[in-house]
């Protein structure tokens, strides 16, 4: 089995273990709306990424990335890529001109049945990702980039995350900052979504340290 397909199979079967023993960065663009699309998982030949997640010691780990199918990435290698697979992509939304982009694009509902069984969003870097209940196994999610004014951000980010739930509640808020970044993936099984977050700290020369992996069910 090609290395990319083997990696994808491991990620699907053992997501927490994969994320503890591999660095994974997802690339996307807020120019694309949230919704179904296809991605690829690619193993690079880059050296220097480390992990302490799930272990007492720091160790070298492979570096993978996910990229939308058909979008150029300088490290893409067809021999190390998986086949294209279906996902729900959650686009990052921003606070501009005194308001968040409208709720129809700020939030996205992951269905409890039908469609892709994996969710991806671009790397968190100073952003907040919200996960909340909807109905019948569906989950409403959002990926928000705060405005540069810290005082304003402390007010509008919680408001933006909570907007659109129509009386529902937030189950999780995953936050990042300039030093600690994050990868968030969602997987649906048996009509229910489970999310995993990989937190990593960037280091020189485009390397990083995976610090922890958390399962959010």
Image: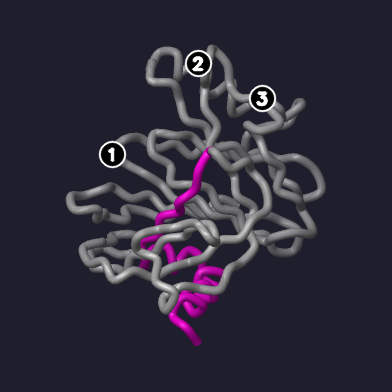
Q: Nearer the viewer, residue 77 or 40?
A: 77
Examine the residues drawn in magenta and state their main secondary structure.
helix
CA gap, disc 2 to disc 1?
22 Å
CA gap, disc 1 to disc 3?
29 Å
Farthest residue to the left: give it. Answer: 204
- Residue tagged by mark 2? 155
Residue numbers of the magenta segment: 1-30
Q: Position of residue 80 (x, y in %)?
A: 41, 76
- Residue tagged by mark 1? 179
Ranked by sequence position, the earlier of labels 3 and 2 is: 3
Q: Nearer the viewer, residue 55 or 148?
A: 148
Ranked by sequence position, the earlier of labels 2 and 1 is: 2
Specify whether 42 is left or right of 99: left
- Residue tagged by mark 3? 102
Verify whether residue 82 appears in magenta.
Answer: no
Residue at x-position 24% and y-position 55%: 207
CA gap, disc 3 to disc 2?
17 Å
Asked which quadrant contains residue 116, the reply is: bottom right
């Amino acid at each position: 089995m090609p290395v990319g397909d083997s990696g994808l199979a491991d990620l699907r079967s053992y997501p927490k273990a994969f994320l503890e023993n591999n660095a994974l960065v997802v690339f996307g663009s807020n120019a694309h709306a949230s919704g179904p699309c296809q991605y690829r998982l690619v193993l690079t030949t880059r050296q220097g990424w480390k992990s302490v997640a799930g272990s007492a010691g720091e160790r070298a780990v492979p570096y993978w990335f996910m990229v939308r199918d058909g979008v150029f990435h300088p490290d893409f290698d067809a021999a190390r890529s998986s086949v294209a697979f279906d996902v729900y992509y959650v686009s990052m939304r921003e606070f501009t001109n005194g308001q968040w982009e409208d709720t129809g694009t700020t939030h996205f509902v992951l269905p409890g049945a039908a469609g892709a069984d994996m969710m991806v969003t671009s790397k968190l870097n100073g952003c907040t990702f919200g996960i909340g209940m909807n109905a019948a196994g569906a989950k409403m999610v959002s990926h928000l980039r705060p405005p540069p004014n810290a005082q304003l951000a402390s007010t509008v980010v919680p408001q933006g995350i909570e907007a659109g739930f129509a009386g529902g509640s937030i189950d999780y808020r995953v936050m990042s900052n300039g030093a600690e970044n994050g990868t968030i993936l969602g997987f649906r099984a048996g009509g229910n979504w489970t999310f995993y977050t990989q937190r990593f700290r960037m280091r020189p020369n485009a390397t990083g340290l995976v610090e922890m992996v958390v399962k959010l069910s």
